[in-house]
Amino acid sequence: MHHMTLAEIARGLADKKFSSEELTQVLLARIAQLDPQLNSFISLTEELALGQAKAADARRANGETGALLGAPIAHKDLFCTQGIRTSCGSKMLDNFKAPYDATVVAKLAAAGTVTLGKTNMDEFAMGSANESSYYGAVKNPWNLEHVPGGSSGGSAAAVAARLLPAATATDTGGSIRQPAAFTNLTGLKPTYGRVSRWGMIAYASSLDQGGPLARTAEDCAILLQGMAGFDPNDSTSIDEPVPDYSASLNGSLQGLRIGVPKEYFSAGLDPRIAELVHNSVKELEKLGAVIKEISLPNMQHAIPAYYVIAPAEASSNLSRFDGVRFGHRCENPENLVDLYKRSRGEGFGAEVQRRIMVGAYALSAGYYDAYYLKAQKIRRLVKNDFMAAFNEVDIILGPTTPNPAWKLGAKNSDPIAEYLEDVYTITANLAGLPGLSMPAGFVDGLPVGVQLLAPYFQEGRLLNVAHQYQLNTDWHTRTPTGF
């Protein structure tokens, strides 16, 4: 059962080959047995899961259908879940039980999904390795000595290890696509505003976006269908009709124009990954796609711009965590200032403190124009590059990451080296574009991903290309040894 995809589970439930309750019990037992190796979960919700599974089985018995009805998933631990700890991977929120469900959680629950638990993550989604979590690092199931990527590493490791078929995740600068690449999954960051951020604890509000992590593009289409849609509670949600993502999976790629930016193939890219990217291009050419070299000239400025904008927004968003109304509070504060200082100093980890300080500095009087304003101007130039490129091509293809997953602890003493691993993913967040990573091969036994980018609200096109690629390759079917 644990090897089934979401699509296979939907067919099995429809054909009454097994019940949602039986499947849920199998997966909960598997999590209990295998997750101690991975540390991919922060909280398990066995009672809730079994109750939702029974309810889903009852709904099916009454004639209701649906691809997600009875499907087991998990939520990244920054989606608020009513009455359940929502920690954001931080000591600051270790004791916080959300009083309401995030829109994504509520929509998926209404569709009949079964929540197995909340997955581990970098603290407040700040990191590319899932090593900054208060609950300890997550291990990559492909090699337990390596990182699974971040910040959605818990969701990625759990799905890759076949502990569950799919999970929710979020992407601020690549945090869905990079873990997908490192763990041999398909991960989709939708267009900014496509999926509601209401009830999703913020890191950087103009960059954060929720999306699906699964083994196949078909499964991502199913999960995104349940997540997407306009939400009046979210002022950044866009009122755009949600298409049937599964219906577009089987479209022909004949004549599809694929752009490959020359800037992607610089000295920083592992040549073995470059070879796998070129192999995927050849595969898509066989399916009728037309390849064209393009240029994204401002890509080189994206990382410095991102690491001004994101920390600036983080310093503002995280100012609410002060030990007063909720979250960690220090013992026996002497006065209000001492309460603030010690509660925040004790509650936030090193990486979060680092980004808050960078952000506060960039927004301070005298430096706002020099850093934050300039970064926003670069952001516009990055977007303009994409708009010009999409006048010539339908999608853009390149590597998801410059290197395969590194060893645990290898970059802890050099945060900048870790930041540079986001070089191919952050531009989509700066521009608000949809992006997808799909499995494309292995380097030294570790998975490698290829990234696809498309114009706004063209998630269906990305899923279509990835699905056709997966019908003709078998990278996505590989399973890590021992899982």
Image (spheres, helix red, strand yellow):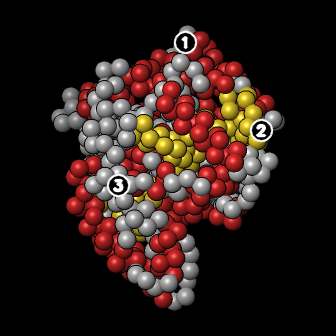
Report the residue at 47% width, 17% height from top.
Answer: 361
Amino acid type at mark 2: Val
The residue furthest bottom is: 62
- Give the number of marks: 3
**Up/down of 262 relative to 61, above or below:** above
What residue do we see at 30% from left, 71% from top?
26
Q: Nearer the viewer, mark 3 or mark 1?
A: 3
Q: How far apart are marks 2 and 3 (CA)?
A: 36 Å
Question: How far apart are the two marked residues, 3 and 1, measured between alpha carbons?
Answer: 46 Å
Closest to the observer, 410 or 134: 410
Task: Determine whether, in the image, residue 297 is placed left or right of residue 339.
Answer: right
The mark nearer the N terminus, 2 or 1, is: 1
How far from the left and from the top, in percent, is residue 167?
Answer: 44, 56
Q: Report the residue marked by disc 3.
A: 161
Marked residue nearer the N-terminal end (2 or 3): 3
Mark 2 or 1, closer to the camera: 2
Q: Which amino acid does label 1 sit on?
A: Tyr
Badge 1 marks a residue whose secondary structure is: loop
Kindly give the residue lying farthest to the left in the view shown: 332
Viewer-closest of 227 and 177: 177
Amino acid at pointer 3 = Ala
Viewer-proximal residue, 436 or 123?
436
**Nearer the N terminus, badge 3 or badge 1?**
3
Is disc 3 surrounded by few (<14), some (14 to 19) or many (20+) residues within 10 Å?
Answer: many
Pointer 1 residue: 367
Give percent across and percent down for residue 157: 36, 49
Residue 142 position in % (x across, y down): 34, 46
